[in-house]
Amino acid sequence: MKVVTIVGARPQFIKAAVVSPRLRQVAHEVLIHTGQHYDQTLSTVFFEHLPIPHPDYTLTAGSGTHGVQTGRMLVDLDPILQREAPDWVIVYGDTNSTVAGALAAVKMGIPVAHVEAGLRSFNRSMPEEINRVMTDHIATRLYCPTQQAVHNLAQEGIRTGVKLTGDVMDTLVDQTPDNLAVLNRYGIDSGQYILATVHRAQNTDDSGHLHSLLQAFMALPKPVFWPMHPRTRQKIHEFQLDALLTPPMMVVDPVGYQEMITLERHAYAVVTDSGGVQREACRVGTPTYILREETEWGELVATGQAVLTGWRTHDIVTAVREQRARPKPAIHAYDPVAMILEDLLRKEE
Ligand code: UD1
Ligand code: UDP
């Protein structure tokens, strides 16, 4: 069996690091990097430090408007998929690389397997929500990380090809050892900082929201340590908010995966609008505050593992100050990757 895997953004490289090595034990994999993320800190670092195979093809989608970026990917993926003629295309998550990969494949009659299917924030103004819905409606196999995701698909009439596998990221988080050098490097102490990440369009592209977040970060009970996405850095500059990035807040470039997991484990709290970071921070048992009005990982909020704060200064500061112990997630004995591979290899009924 031949499988083409299409990745393009940071969280997808990390997911491919979990799935690709095992996929290669049972199938011939061809890896395509769309080039959506291209910086050392958003792309190269993961290929250097995680067991992701070197891409067979690296495209140059780069940055741009959604239409331009997605369109470039479609144009470049077309001839490659035609040449490779795989049995399956695997896509991950909800980025423009996900929807472009899925669309390029189905237009050529190649079935798509979507890992992380069925998640919904129910906020159609999020680009990611559009990408999720589109991808799920054209995928043949839909691998869901949660029971709620299975339910969401059923609500949209998608029942065939759906499988509850769990989240492929869980095992990676559990198996990643600490790299305490990262704390020494930045001179921060375990339990004495709040880890922040921000990159969602609704937070970065609205100067009022960004201003409000920065004011909140200055008023939190511990200094904020912030590995900053380049998008956010650019927007802070564009909105002339740089003056608010003052000590004890510490802003650094994005860090590698092992460093990030270590920072999540040792933080006093995590404040984030990232999908992956909110999941991981809850998994390692650190109090987690989601800088959004809603989340596609609703179970984290329903079970009290995370709190939705939105973007308003007062709401964020109040929530973090009221910090209480959060229940650790139940650790299930399951192997999402094995379930996905077993399902992918089975013959169509
Ligand atoms: C993208 C995904 C988002 C995902 C995130 C993971 C979409 C619509 N968004 O958001 O779902 O959570 O990746 O991190 O697919 N930039 C750089 N260097 C890079 C890449 C981007 O400086 O290597 C800057 C550019 O100014 C670019 C901006 O970041 O315009 C946004 O990049 P883009 O890939 O469009 O979206 P992300 O915000 O990274
Ligand atoms: N991550 C990382 N370094 C960072 C920030 C995030 O390695 O500086 C990892 C994080 O541990 C998680 C993934 O990137 O596994 C989440 O990616 P991101 O927040 O960019 O996207 P999202 O999950 O929101 O789509």
Image: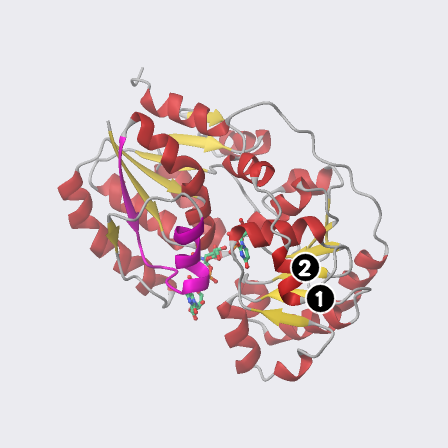
Horizontal arrangement in the rendering, residue 196 relative to residue 7 (left or right): right
* Residue kind at label 1, given as amino acid type: Val
Horizontal arrangement in the rendering, residue 333 relative to residue 188 (left or right): left
Query: Farthest residue toward the left?
Result: 83
Local secondary structure at mark 1 = strand
* Horizontal and vertical percent position of residue 271: 69, 57
Instruction: Give, as a single range, the part of the protein colored magenta.
Output: 28-49
Residue 146 in magenta? no
Please tell me which residue is depicted at 35% across the width and 31% down the height of the picture: 23
Q: Which residue is mark 1?
A: 224
Q: Contact (CB < 8 A) between labels 1 and 2?
A: yes
Q: Which residue is mark 2?
A: 195
Q: Considering the image in quadrants, where does the C terminus appear? A: top left
Mark linked to residue 165: none
* Residue kind at label 2, given as amino acid type: Leu
Please tell me which residue is depicted at 84% across the width and 47% down the height of the picture: 324
